[in-house]
Amino acid sequence: AAYKCFSTQDEIAAFREQAKEAGTSTLFRSPWRDVAEADHPDLPYVVRLKAPKDGAISIADAVQGEVTWKAETLDDMVLLRSDSSPVYMLAVVVDDYDMGVTHVVRGDDHLANAARQSMIYTAMGWDLPTFAHIPLIH
C-alpha cells in the first residue's frame, strides 16, 4: 500500500508550476508509484501511501453524517520523510490504534484529516474509530 518516492522537492514544484500554467490539477502523482524496487536508484526517498486512483473514500461521521471525498482530490501522501521520521498523520493513527482509541472527536476544521487517516487505517487492516467532527462554534 506504500512505496518509495524519489521525486525531489524541485521536481514536485516544477510539476505543480507546469500544472498551474496548463490549468490542470496540481495534485502530485509520483512517477515512482509503480516502479519495481529493483529499478530504484540509490538516492534519498520518502515513503508515500497509495491513494485510490478512482472512486471515493467515505467515513460515517457521528456528527456530520456520511462524508465522501472523490479519489481524484487525494494525493499519495507522505508517511515517512527522507530522514525516516513519520509525519503527523501516520503518527497520530498509530498512536490512536496503540492506545485503543475508539472515538476521535475534534473540530470540523480537521474533517479532511479523516479521509487521509482512514486510508492509513484501511492499509493497516485496522478498524476505523468513530469519527465525530463538531462545529468550532458550538
Image (cartoon, grey):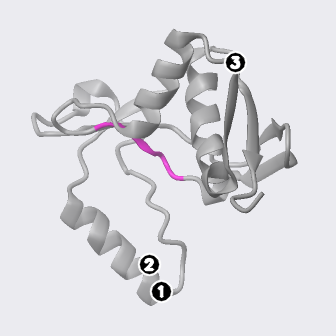
Q: Earlier in the sequence, mark 3 or mark 1?
A: 1
Confirm or deny contact between disc 2 and disc 1 (CB under 8 A): yes
- Determine whether the residue tagged by mark 1 lies in a helix, strand or loop: helix
Query: Which residue position is annotated with label 2?
Result: 19
Query: Which residue position is annotated with label 1?
Result: 22
Gap between marks 3 and 1 measured at Cα:
44 Å
- Determine whether the residue tagged by mark 2 lies in a helix, strand or loop: helix
Q: How many marks?
A: 3
Badge 2: few (under 14), some or many (20 or more) residues near its Cα, within 10 Å?
some
Toward the viewer: 126 or 111?
A: 111
Q: Is residue 109 above or below residue 50?
A: below
Residue 123 x, y percent position in the rendering: 57, 23
For residue 103, what is the image quadrant?
top right
Q: Amino acid at mark 3?
A: Thr
Does the stretch in magenta take in 108? no
Magenta region, residue range: 75-80
Residue located farthest toward the left when viewing the structure as drawn: 42
Name the residue at 51% across, 52% down: 75
Q: Is residue 101 above or below residue 111?
A: above
Q: Is residue 105 above or below residue 37?
A: below
Name the residue at 54% across, 78% down: 24
Query: Which residue position is annotated with label 3?
Result: 102
Q: Is residue 91 left or right of residue 11?
A: right
Q: Amino acid at mark 1?
A: Ala
Q: Earlier in the sequence, mark 2 or mark 3?
A: 2
For residue 80, what is the image quadrant?
top left
Gap between marks 2 and 3 measured at Cα:
40 Å
Indicate which label's residue lies in the foreground, 2 or 3. 3
